[in-house]
Amino acid sequence: MRVLQLALAALLAAPPLQAQQGVDPVPVLPHRDLQLALARATQSNIVSRLLVGESRGGRQIEALRIAGGTLEAGRPAILLVAGLEGPEAWTSGLALALTRELVQGYDADPAVRRMLDTTTVYVIPRANPDACEARFERVQQEVRASGPGTDEDRDARRGEDGPQDIDGDGVIAWMRVPMAGGGWVADAVDPRVLVPAEGTTVGRWRLVPEGLDADGDGAVAEDAPLDVEVNRNFPAGFEEHTPRAGRFATQEPATRALCDFVLTHRDLQLVLVYGEHDTVADPRDPVPDDAPDVKRVPPTGPRASDAAYLADLAQRYVEHTGDEAGTRGDDSGTFARWCSEHRGLWTLAIDPWTVPLGDAPEGEAPQPSEEARALAWLEASGVDAHLGWQPFDHPLLGPVEVGGFRPYALAEPPAEARTALVPGQLAFLTSLNADLARLALAEVTSSDLGGGLLEVRATLTNTGRLPLLGVWARRTRATRPVRIELALPEGAQLLGGSRVQLVEELAGSREHELRWIVRGSGTPTVLVDSDHAGRVRATCEEVPR
Amino acid sequence: MTWLTAPLLAGALLAPQDDPPPTGFPGLPVGHAPRVEIPWNRLYDLEELYAHLDRLVEAYPDLLERRVLGRSIENREVRLYVLHDRRTGEDRGKPAMWIDGNVHGNEVQAGESVAYVAWYLLENHGHNPRVDALLDRCTFYLVPSVNPDGRARWFAEAHTASSSRTGLRPVDDDRDGVADEDPTNDLDGDGHITQMRKHVPGEGTHRLHPDDPRRMERVPVDERGLRGDWILLGREGVDDDGDGRLNEDGLGGYDMNRAWPSDWQPTHVQRGAGDYPLFWPETRAVASFLYEHPNIAAVQSFHNAGGMILRGPGAEVFGEYPAEDLRVYDSLGEDGERMLPFYRYMILWRDLYSVFGGFATWTYEGLGIISFTNELWSRSRRYPEPERAPDDPHWFDDHLLSSAGFVDWAPYDHPLYGPIEIGGWKKDVGRVPPSFLLEEELHRNAMFCLEHAQAMPEVSLVPEGPTLTELGDETWALDVVLRNARRIPTRTARAAEQSIGMPDVLVLRGRKVRVLASGVHTDRFRPEALKLTGDEPRRVLLERGVPGLGEVRVRFLVQGEGEFTLQYRSQKAENILHKGLLE
């Protein structure tokens, strides 16, 4: 066993998930390197760096704004957020790779150029730098929480008994404790993998996090020093009184900074979130457009009309990426849910990679669990994904074995798989340009009604596929409607119609007719003003006399 | 301190002393005038109110301290005044009562109510043993105005009784891309926002009251159609932004009492809630303080109007509060109904209206603290004998206030409506008491606060102390009884059920003492009936604390000899340290 442990230590000296020779196109970067990458990105004159906020740990959260052409107010925008959960630190690299591809595509690919000349893309590659930084600590551990600890074990002490690297192998993993009825048994094919004992099977092990009983209360690692997770701390579906959610929504500086970013970027129409939750493969069931509130609270779930648009986007995502896996999971208090439920933004939560499963044996042979098949795939791909089980004499639990899946092994794709994600994700992202609602004003005309009266007509068009505002966006009132104003020249008088009107409802490829009756000379101007679908103005053509 | 009382009183009878000459003002024993005179029959703008409290700080530096919780949107201080006897310990070491007011800027007498509590306690300190005991044992955290911007503007500018409720962060109420561009306008420049009416003979919805042309009556609709001579045009104003609507985008436009984190809902569910909980700096400053002061064991928030003592839940979806806590609520609420004539003890969602993100619902549901919101001033107090109350809404104003509360209708040439009339009730009518009733209102509500403060947990070991029973072989049973002399438990049921804050803990230590086992007695007649402690028997954890007017009996089974210490720690009661001897 000593030999094995030494071999393990040698492996650990190298980065845990070894990149290929040469430059990794989708690198997994610690915060400092990520900041350098952001600085490098701004060498392109279509990229600027924006400060989103500062994390609890004092790390800067930044956004890149990618925009060619003229940056007019009201230009539609897409937001891409990555690195929201600790185990998903690698998605920051994917977001940066897409940034790089967009910048290069701006010069090389007409479709990309067209997009970036009319649409703003914001990328927040690492929304939760504190939790992601655990990925690069000397001692490896999958960390989700970065906010203050609570008294989880209710012993009037806070965060006094967290997981520890008790065998000094540089990894905080799992302990299996031999115990009849313990709830876990070995997988039928790969005995390293533990699966829950089901049916009449009697469990052989208890599975507990690697740790001691620091507070001497007989429980191991039951009160970690950190509890609150940034991506549980958003207001939609927030679970008060659970340690991982935080004491109140937006308690975490990173959470609040992200909210403020969305609130102050009123050009946003569509949000993509890379992380653990997936609403593309696993959307929430829709509710009818007119679903009534229950005791004043609206039912959760996309309104049917909105869900249909989201389903179209999801289908296109699958066509471009081939990624049909992923689960929504428990998305209470997540950023994506807030964007959609409280802000009414078109939002897709995307888990861009799920471990493929190795082949299952055919016929009567014992069937491996999904975890065992995932492990088989990872090992076939050259990933050192499992630590094995090393005996350890635990001061409280007696003889146990320490090991299990290597931290991040199931969450993080190997380098080749990461690289392979880029083209599909890019194609999907670029395709969204045609979806965004965009206002156009067909020629403004006027006709002489006689008696000095003019009838002014204009046609407002949404040239995108998505409605100007979805059903839910109209309910949340978070995005302001289009404001249409008829500006009259000096001396002209409005005799019919509204000088100022607001339009909320305009489906994709649809028109909205506008009419006014005016008296006087000169040429009226129609001003169309929105925060998220463009601003246009058109002056009446020469009045026929 | 008690031995001092007798000689002082004797001195007062026999010899000249330092106190000012007798003035006989209520609330103090005859023979004492207040050090700080504050007329309580009037309202004060923000600076005046703060200045009065600052005078109290100056006069009572050992008892009152001024702090700044944070700053408002318009950079005014949100001030906190900390009141307690500093000679008896740190403010954080004592159970504390939080009292605030005026989160709605227009609900002004809430500020005076908070200030009166400070003034009453300070001026009675040293004269009244109950007040002395309260300031020894408890801390008061007093915030006279959670919304200093709203208050300042309500006094300084033309308003109605209901306007300036909001804070001052601009909001685009009419969603036209510009914020706060179409407020009401004081067209006649009289310092009040009143109403507009227009004479449209035979085409109106209203007519003048036959007995009093100041009053408007709706004309009943019948088959002959409209036949009134007047229409009402709403609050005084013009269409500032030319969008065809009047007064639709005034200053601010939100409600800081819908912003608190428990059961918070976004603006499209709960109007005025803001974009996320604690969205505004005033609310975040207050919440940070409350989260960081787990010693707060009682909360009172002052609003106007309606004569109500409100408790949560704020929303029907919540359900109902645990029965143990309701007993405390009901007991205080019933006291309140006796102390506050015409006030009713009510459940917010059921008896008033439903509110998500309310303050006192958060302090209970989120922080586990027994909390009330009082809606100050009941109009019933104008006529304490209801059977004698007239129908005429002007009668009280005409006969008891010389018609000072009403702006008589007067002609005005409106840019859109042409010739109209402007008139109506002034901003200080309807939601605040008239001057001669204000002091009574403040005093009764302050005394309700003190009743609530008195009820904060006070835990002691029973006077006879822990009892020892020898079990042989140097082993002992040590029985400890913790008794709470007050109504509020050290851990409300809500706090216990939701794991809010820390449980109480009783720790036994001794150099030569080993704790073998411990537990909480569940049956006083069966000493072995114990709910046993876990793997650490020297620490007995009390998630449900010590109940109000009740006790917890703990047994330690120990081995050894010599000195031991018992330490009781609670976030909401003073800690206890007891030394004893195993013998």
Image (cartoon, coloured by chain):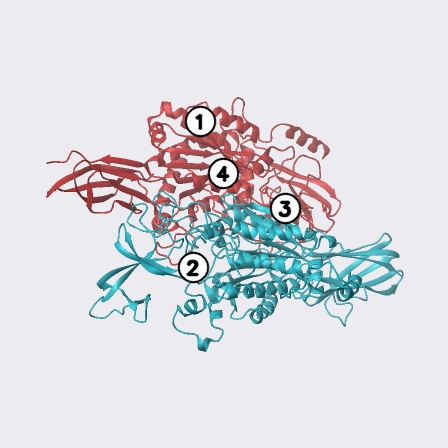
Which of marks 3 and 2 precedes in the sequence?
3
Circles 3 and 4 on the same chain: yes
Name the residue carrying label 4.
A356
Badge 2 vs badge 3, beta-carbon distance below 8 Å: no
Packing grade of label 4 (10 A; few <14, some 14-19, many >=20) is: some
**Distance CA(mark 2)–CA(mark 3):** 34 Å
Q: Secondary structure at mark 3?
A: loop
B413 above or below A405?
Answer: below
Name the residue carrying label 2.
A296
Name the residue carrying label 1.
A100
Badge 3 vs badge 4, beta-carbon distance below 8 Å: no
Q: Which shade is chain A?
A: red
**Three-letter residue code for mark 4:** Pro
Q: Give percent across and percent down for residue B247.
A: 35, 51
**Subunit of label 3:** A
Q: Give percent across and percent down for residue A447.
A: 13, 40
**Three-letter residue code for mark 1:** Arg
**Three-letter residue code for mark 2:** Arg
